[in-house]
Amino acid sequence: MGDESLQILVGSEGDNLPLMEIGTCRLEAFHQWDCVLVADLQTQKIQKQVQRQQQFLEKLESKGFHFKMIKDQKKVFFGIRADSGIFDLYRTLLMKPEDPGPRTKLSNMNSIPATTRIRIVSFVVNNKMKPGDTFEDLVKDGVFETMFPLHEGEKDLQKKWARWRNMFRKQPIDDIRNYFGEKVALYFAWLGWYTYMLVPAAVVGLIIFLSGFALFDSSQISKEICGAKDIFMCPLGDNSRRYQPLSELCTFAKLTHLFDNDGTVLFAIFMALWATVFLEIWKRQRARVVLHWDLYGWDEEEEEMALELINYPEYKLRTHHHSYLSSTIILILSLFMICFMIGMAHVLVVYRVLAAALFSSLLEQQVTTVVVVTGAVVHYVIIVIMTKVNKCVALKLCNFEDPRTFSERESKFTVKFFILQFFAHFSSLIYIAFILGRINGHPGKSTRLAGLWKLEECHLSGCMMDLFIQMAIIMGLKQTLSNCVEYLCPWLAHKCRLMRAYEHGHESKDPELEEWQRNYRMNPVNTFSLFDEFMEMMIQYGFTTIFVAAFPLAPLLALFSNLVEIRLDAIKMVRLQRRLVPRKAKDIGTWLQVLETIGVLAVIANGMVIAFTSEFIPRVVYKYRYGPCGQNRNFTEDCLKGYVNHSLSVFYTKDFQDHGRMEGQENVTVCRYRDYRNDRGYNFSEQFWFILAIRLAFVILFEHVALCIKLIAAWFVPDVPQSVKNKVLEEKYRILREKMCFSSRSTDV
């Protein structure tokens, strides 16, 4: 072939893998190969490496594989194709004993889907041959570099799916399944359904948010704050020496009312119902898809046993086992990591306290906002770092537990990794929502960190502002910055690999070698490639539901992000990455339990946000007990009149130890702070305990109502459509009828 001289190794049954020098003979088309192994050209100069390569290939040959070896200027490529007998064995092992006429059915199944071929070949190649000679061991020792299936026939997917212009088009799920396997297809089917269901959630959240604009200037609370020029707030930080007029918080008060209004409660209940309906209808969608793929009765455990027997006929079944000792150790280590995650949240607390002390002298009036914004950025950086740490820890825990099968290992790893990721992402939000500003004491007697630094307090307009800013920044960074990095990094890596290849020699004129080189230059993939996509969506789903009461725009942001995410993942998988090894599946596995857990956590968290973080309960209590409407049923003005003054406690400035150094201290005798305390002694007032009791009662009532709604919705929407049940029933009936006919013919004979 031109100036090239290629060494080609062809393996078949009975051959001893001789090295052959081929000149201009025409090779078979590249689409015959199930996968390609790659090794560095330098390995051919080391006799031991060559021997290990040949031993590995001979072992595969004994199982019924054919080979070809082609060299270029830097690499050695080994094309591998399995004999049809392997797939006949696979079909025989998975044929149900009760099926009539197995030999007849087997003869009609002439073609094997490419996804099935690749999955079986990949399993056999990667599975244990003998200790020290697994493909993974050979890669570690430098004998081989990698293995990948070839991209073939992907042009149709590129045209219909993996383009930005197709962002609003329906996904070709069947085509995705035929190319990448059921596992990937179900991921995109779920992601598409999740994105579709985000539309009503985003619309309702946007309406709740925009409804606050209708009261932007007419809210009684905002009016009172904007007109309170004679009410002075106590300084928040140690370095703040100024009594800030309450009227300066006018803008923040109006902004807070956008997401902390009476509609927040209705939206939280709506999202609890939405999460349930979303999951229940997804189960119905999954049932239809799986029935369409003829996988309704497929068993993953049986599949894995069949693959093991194909790889090693003397395979001994590994039974289920449980060790209380190992479970205890894993539990202790998991709790240690969770405590470490909580400790990282405390590191963030320390940062915010120190930042408040630092910025208070530079940005006296906006110090709280600056601390919240920079704290959110620091939290995002911590999340990025801890994600890598959590993955390593979860893997170590899984290896220690030694699961029986790969699917069991994946399930256990999913649970462990998600728990660690949950605390990494949400620990600081939990702190802001339920702890921030509640253990600070009161002016003149503040709780201090290490006895030196005053603990951070909520924004003067309320803790909901802090939670809103934290949510907005973290979601904004994760959905925008992460998506940019997720696309640009693979794109740049692919371009760099192409540039390096072009710098080191000309392209091959052999179409087969050229195709192998093209696939090799794509970005590598691993077992975590799809897992990482699922985890990213689970965390986003958590942000969309768990603290949605504080950030009603979360579904809208998630909707825009997912429209990009679908095409971004499609482009990565089809155009930038090597082909994923297809995996068979009939559901999204453990991720469904994760989604259901998040749904329950969302009910609890949103109920507590409304009760303890929002001003909803104090407003309701004031309206019907302490306010003018509670005292006079015939009151015709706004029932919240006087609420601001009622919600602020009084502190006498003379009780400050350094009162003389305060600016304008000669004109201010009292300052106000957000709490319910008595004027004398500064202990909690009767209103504090009454409101606390109402908060607790509301949490219990809200959670019971929301959970009842979830249960009713789950009951009302069946998991499996009746049409699917009827088709499965009809198939069972057909098989029984055929058995009866077969039995009758046998008796007659």
Image (cartoon, grey):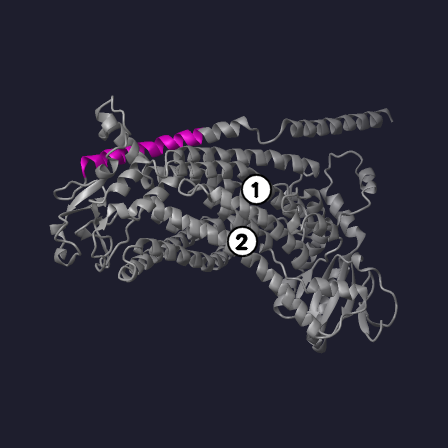
Kindly identify which numbered label has been placed on residue 23: none
Query: Left or right: 334 with respect to 222?
Result: right
Q: Position of residue 420 (x, y in %)?
A: 45, 52
Q: Taking 17 as reference, is 733 above or below it? A: above
Task: Give the residues in magenta.
Answer: 685-708
- Residue at image mark 1: 195
| Residue found at x 25% / y 46% | 246
Amino acid type for the residue under numbered disc 2: Asp
Asked if residue 524 is positioned above or below residue 89 in the image, the reply reads below
Q: Position of residue 61 (x, y in %)?
A: 77, 61
Q: Quadrant of residue 237?
A: bottom left
Q: Which quadrant is home to the C terminus?
A: top right
Quadrant position of the N terminus in the picture: bottom right
Q: Residue furthest bottom?
A: 45
Mark number displayed over residue 402: 2
Earlier residue among tags 1 and 2: 1
In the image as oriented, which residue stretches furthest toward the top?
A: 634
